[in-house]
Amino acid sequence: MNYGLKLKELRNEYNITQKEMADILGIKRSSYNQFEQQYDIIPINRLNQIANYFNVSIDYILNLNTIKSYDNNLKDLNNYIIKNRIKTLRKELKLTQIKMAEVLNTVQPVIANYENGKNLISTPFLYTLCKTYNISADYLLGKTNEPKYID
């Protein structure tokens, strides 16, 4: 994942300091710096806040494609949609929870927790699913219905 450069690029494009961006997100500047330097993994909720602020897609921030934004992009994350889309993707790919866990280098209960909405998918697992199966992060997160797949 190489989102740090994209975060810095967007912030500079809007002439916003790290401190100002941290204030927008309601976090400390040092925490935001950790995201931009990729010393710390940015949580999905923070990633969504940034995408909304800059009016760009999560796919764009994660460098999954070069499309800055999608038509009819929703602002809020809906855990019900997310859990169903993860489960539907797994079934479309004819994967068991165990097999999907292997793809993500984790254990089956983690996948079960994503699919039952107990936990929000982690950014690295989202990124791996998107890269492995050419699926849009914005689609999986319920922010858009199109595109489902990325080029």
Image (cartoon, helix red, strand yellow):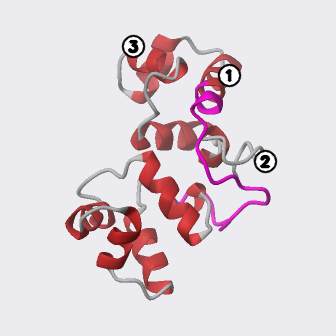
Query: Which of the two residues, 92 or 122, is positioned nearer the viewer here?
Result: 122
The amino acid at mark 1 is: Thr
Q: For the residue carrying disc 3, how many other residues have a C-alpha within 10 Å: few (<14), some (14-19), or many (20+)?
A: few
Q: For the point 55% across and 11% down, which residue is it?
A: 96
Relative to 101, residue 19 above or below: below
Reading the image, the residue beneath label 1 is 88
Q: For the point 54% across and 20% down, which residue is it?
A: 115
Left or right: where does residue 8 sit relative to residue 33?
A: right
Corner quadrant of residue 133: top right
Left or right: where does residue 90 sit relative to residue 125?
A: right
The answer to which of marks 3 and 1 sits earlier in the sequence is: 1
Return the mark for residue 146. 2
The amino acid at mark 2 is: Glu
Q: Which residues are magenta?
A: 63-83
The amino acid at mark 3 is: Pro
Query: Which of the two residues, 129 or 43, is positioned nearer the viewer here?
Result: 43
Q: Residue furthest left?
A: 30
